[in-house]
Amino acid sequence: MKNLVILTGAGMSAESGISTFRDSGGLWENYDVMQVASIEGWYENPDLMLQFYNDRRSQLKDVEPNEGHKVIAGLEQFFHVTIVTQNVDNLHERAGSSSVIHLHGELTKACNESKTIVSDIGYKDIHPGDKASDGTRLRPFIVWFGEAVPLIEEAARIVSSADILVIVGTSLQVYPAAGLVNYVKPGVSVYLIDPNDVSAAKNVKVIKEKASVGLKLLQSEIM
C-alpha cells in the first residue's frame, strides 16, 4: 500500500460546526488569543483558560464528524493513511481513522503542569483546584503558544515517508506545523484543498473546495 499522509487544520472541522481560528466571525474574534491559547495566559488567568476549554469540550460533544472526515477514514481501505492534524478535536477518530497525530494536543485529555501525566477525561470539565496525581494543577492537554510541539519530529518523519501528501483545511501559517511540507520527497504528489485563494508551489495541485467536496474529488483522482 502507498503511504498517504494528510495534514489537516481548522477548516477540516469547520463543516462540523467547530469555529475556526482565523476566519472572520470565528470563535477567536471574541478573545485575545494570547489570553486563551498561550502558556502566559495560563499563568495569568488559569480560571479563564479552564472555562474556555470546558466550553470547547462541551461543544465538541454535540458535533459530529462531517463527510470529509468519513472520506479520509474510508481511504484506509486502499492506502496506509496517517493524519497529522493541528486540530485538538477527536472527529477524525470518531469517523473511524486509526492513525492520528495531534500536534497541538487533545481536547478530551488533561495533564499535569509538566505534561508527564496525561489522562482521558472525555467531555468532563476541569475545575479550578483540580489536581493531577503528582499534586500539580490539572490543565488541558493542549500545546499553547510559547510551548514546544513534542510530536513535530515524528510528524516530519511521517511526511518524509509519504507517497502522496494532502493538505486540507489549513492555511499553513502556524509554525512549526507549516514547515512540514518541506520534508516531502521530490516527485511526491502534493494536493492542497482549500476554498480560499491560496498561494502554492507549482508542484502542488490546488483543489479550491471546502474539505468534504475537495476530499471526494481527491478520492476520485488518487483511486
Image (cartoon, rainbow, N blue to C red):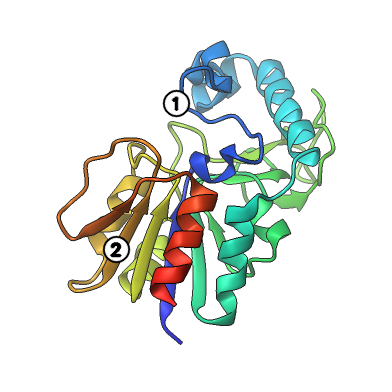
Q: In this view, does 85 lie above or below 140?
A: below
Residue 33 in the figure: left or right of residue 53: left
Picture coordinates of residue 125 (x, y %)?
82, 32
Q: Type of residue at label 1? A: Arg
Q: Which residue lies furthest to the left in this view?
A: 202
Picture coordinates of residue 128 (x, y %)?
79, 23
Neighbor class of circle 2 (other Cα within 10 Å; few <14, some 14-19, many 20+) is: many
Q: Which residue is drawn at 39% across and 70% down?
A: 221
Q: Residue furthest bottom?
A: 1
Pick the quarter of the image with the C terminus: bottom left
Residue 140 in the figure: left or right of residue 216: right
Q: Type of residue at label 2? A: Val
| Viewer-closest of 161 and 205 | 205
Residue 193 in the figure: left or right of residue 72: left
Q: Which residue is drawn at 32% across and 55% down?
A: 180
Q: Residue at x 65, y 49 (%)?
A: 66
Q: Residue 190 carries which label?
A: 2
| Viewer-closest of 117 and 12 | 12
Choose mark 2 or mark 1, whichever is in front: 2
Q: Which residue is drawn at 45% across and 70% down?
A: 220
The residue tagged with tag 1: helix, strand or loop?
loop
Residue 31 visible in the shown view = no
Picture coordinates of residue 177 (x, y %)?
37, 48
Mark 2 and mark 1 lie on one chain; the one further toward the N terminus is 1
How far apart are the two marked residues, 2 and 1, measured between alpha carbons? 24 Å
Neighbor class of circle 1 (other Cα within 10 Å; few <14, some 14-19, many 20+) is: few
- According to the image, label 1 marks what residue? 22
| Viewer-closest of 153 and 166 | 166
Residue 140, by quadrant, is: top right
Q: Is residue 159 above or below residue 137?
A: below
Residue 31, by quadrant, is: top right
The residue tagged with tag 2: helix, strand or loop?
strand
